[in-house]
Image: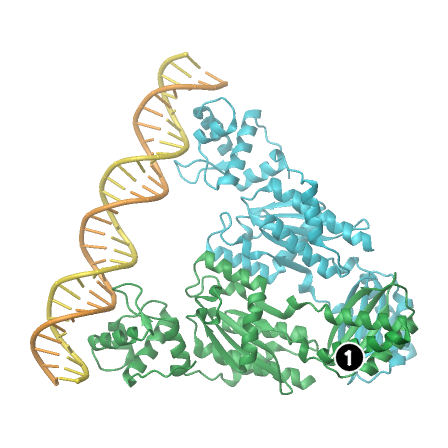
Chain colours: A green, B cyan, C orange, D yellow
Amino acid sequence: MAETLELTERARILMKVLVERYIEEGAPVGSRNLARASGLSVSAATIRNVMADLEEMGLVCSPHTSAGRVPTARGFRFFVDSLLEVQELSEQEVRGLNSRLGHTEEIGQLLERASSTLSEATQMASIVMIPRSEHRSISQVEFLPLSENRVLVILILDDREVQNRIITTSRNYSHSELEQAANYLNSLLAGAELPRVREQILQEMGAIRDQLDAMMQAVLEMTQRAIGEEGEDKDVLVSGESKLMGAGELTDIERLRQLFEAFEEKREMLQLLDQALHGQGIQIFIGKESGYEVFDGCSLITSTYEADGDVMGVVGVIGPTRMPYQRVIPIVDVTARLLAAHLKSRG
Amino acid sequence: MAETLELTERARILMKVLVERYIEEGAPVGSRNLARASGLSVSAATIRNVMADLEEMGLVCSPHTSAGRVPTARGFRFFVDSLLEVQELSEQEVRGLNSRLGHTEEIGQLLERASSTLSEATQMASIVMIPRSEHRSISQVEFLPLSENRVLVILILDDREVQNRIITTSRNYSHSELEQAANYLNSLLAGAELPRVREQILQEMGAIRDQLDAMMQAVLEMTQRAIGEEGEDKDVLVSGESKLMGAGELTDIERLRQLFEAFEEKREMLQLLDQALHGQGIQIFIGKESGYEVFDGCSLITSTYEADGDVMGVVGVIGPTRMPYQRVIPIVDVTARLLAAHLKSRG
DNA sequence: TCTAGCACTCTCACCATGAGAGTGCAAAAA
DNA sequence: TTTTTGCACTCTCATGGTGAGAGTGCTAGA
């Protein structure tokens, strides 16, 4: 992916300055301008020659004959891969981010904070993918009887996250019956990860069928249902969408509408974040590189975050391709690390 | 509020046709056009006279000297109050809405469905205010010990909705201690509504302080915390926002951005919905009537929904002021009723 | 009270025009 | 060979004029 292009040092410098200027100004930058800004003591004509080369390589283009040059998607890609110098955050900035994350027991709330922190700090939209169920382990199961054959199933995951679901059963179970069932399940499942739990429950259902224990059978079934029905649509948080409107080149209302639809649908987002999840660390998607038309004109900067050595999820921001990468990248990076630290310190 | 204006029958008809046409076409409608569309056998010149009257009353205005007339906010208000004839939904349509609501035990999910149903059916943004905590009663409290001085507090409200919160305590409590505490609390609180619960807990804390029962003290405190910390920001759902982009007159990107910010903030939304909540039944806010600048150019149609005779919350849609009221109003109305029916059938 | 006629106004699309910015190329300079 | 200078050329954008179209207000007449 990271292509190495043969470029003279001068061309590299010019390319770098050009992209930086374009990011700042948002307008095509011409040779005269570039000559002054680059600090090279060469004339505009020389620059024009270099620009012609860069154009041939597909790194820049001009919107029309007599405008300056604008980086192409490929140009941006080359820029972030080979030219970009990120600004490290000051300690104060890091502390600022950290304090916005705050302290909270609940993982959901923590991730929401991470999301709003990111969108505030970058002034762009942020996305947070919440930990994938596969990596979580069950630490406790409880049943509470409600009225009318309904039972509240409580799953405690990773000893910190709580999920509950109300299910309807075929008959009433007493408090003690349910307690007994819970004890049984807890001894069976303690510490196991969700995929293994599913498997184990299926096994157990087979075994118990022979013993004709209808009660246990029902309990297993309800646990299965509680685990299975997990809301898949709740896997990604988006916030600060409105900050994208009118930012950078995102000014066409119809395209914006499609982008926002994608946020609402979340399906495409999820697939994209899945790619990021497998890529480990910081990743940058520029424009349509991601494979989705709607993200044309946008860039996505993501970072995975981990807890106890395992990759748990992905955080990131999405903004116009013309975004201040050198600022945004470290913010995403640091936020992911801080998030990981928060997750760890409680585990 | 509902002002009665002295208008001739002819003026009423013309006003009605004008608004309807404007809603359809989105362009100022001229006297010639109106003469044909109204079905009245009068000339355009006569219509012009009537228009001049309507303009004087502030019901219509022309964007410039020689354009047709456009309804003002006040004109729309008059239209919906006195001229509008809503189309009843066909039975098939009602069934369609109902099936989209689906069946679900969880109230949160039901409300989400209501929200997406509304925005799908109207092709506008929908808002749903979830039941206010004040009207809910506690039916059960449970405590589960987790590791490291942390306790999971489970509140079951109205015997169907579940809230949980993890809190950290000063020492470890055993399972049986917590069970005892839960029993005590349950006998104390069963069926009481939240405000009374808060009050009662405070009383009890006073009484117990004398007995120096540190354990009970802590339990009360944690329950208090669990009830108190209730996420106020989770009180309103918005969906289908993207449908507003470019719809009707909502085409200015900066104004759209502010509108979307309001959706994200939710604070203003909440205040507005609070007004709707006290108004009972269907309510219509046109443009800035609501008192919020951001909603200029938008209309909000809301309906309260109830369960067992009590008003629980508000559902509604928000769209351009130029919206097909005769279709949208019954959709909101019916959806609110269906929602109420779902809530009741399970209570 | 309503209608017909008419002058008037305003928008919008269209075109031409000129300034400004930037290019590409060729010839001269380094 | 590389860089610079000079110059013709192109394209955008803002400006202003023009004419068609739509609609109005007003006045006089039915």
Q: From what the image shows, is residue B246 above or below residue B48?
A: below
The crowd level at tag 1 (other Cα within 10 Å; few <14, some 14-19, many 20+) is: some
Q: Look at the image and tell me in which quarter the N terminus of chain B lies.
A: top right
Measuring from the top left, give residue B86's x and y in whole percent: 64, 37
Q: Considering only vertical position in the picture, is B116 above or below C30?
A: above
Query: Is residue B182 at least partly visible in the picture?
Result: no
Quarter of the view holding residue C8: top left
Where is residue A13? Give x, y as percent: 31, 82
Look at label 1 and name its amino acid: Gln
**In the image, residue A116 lies at what x, y percent?**
58, 71
Q: Nearer the viewer, residue B324 or B296?
A: B324
- Name the chain letter of the residue that bears numbered label 1: A
Secondary structure, mark 1, is helix
**Rendered residue at 75%/56% (across/down):** B103
* Residue beneath disc 1: A200
**Residue B160, horizontal then vertical, whole percent:** 81, 62
Work out whether residue A126 or residue A9 is closer to the camera in this orientation and state it: A9
Nearer to the camera, A137 or A69: A137
Q: In the rendered image, which quarter contains the C terminus of chain B? A: bottom right
Instruction: Locate residue A19: give its quadrant.
Output: bottom left
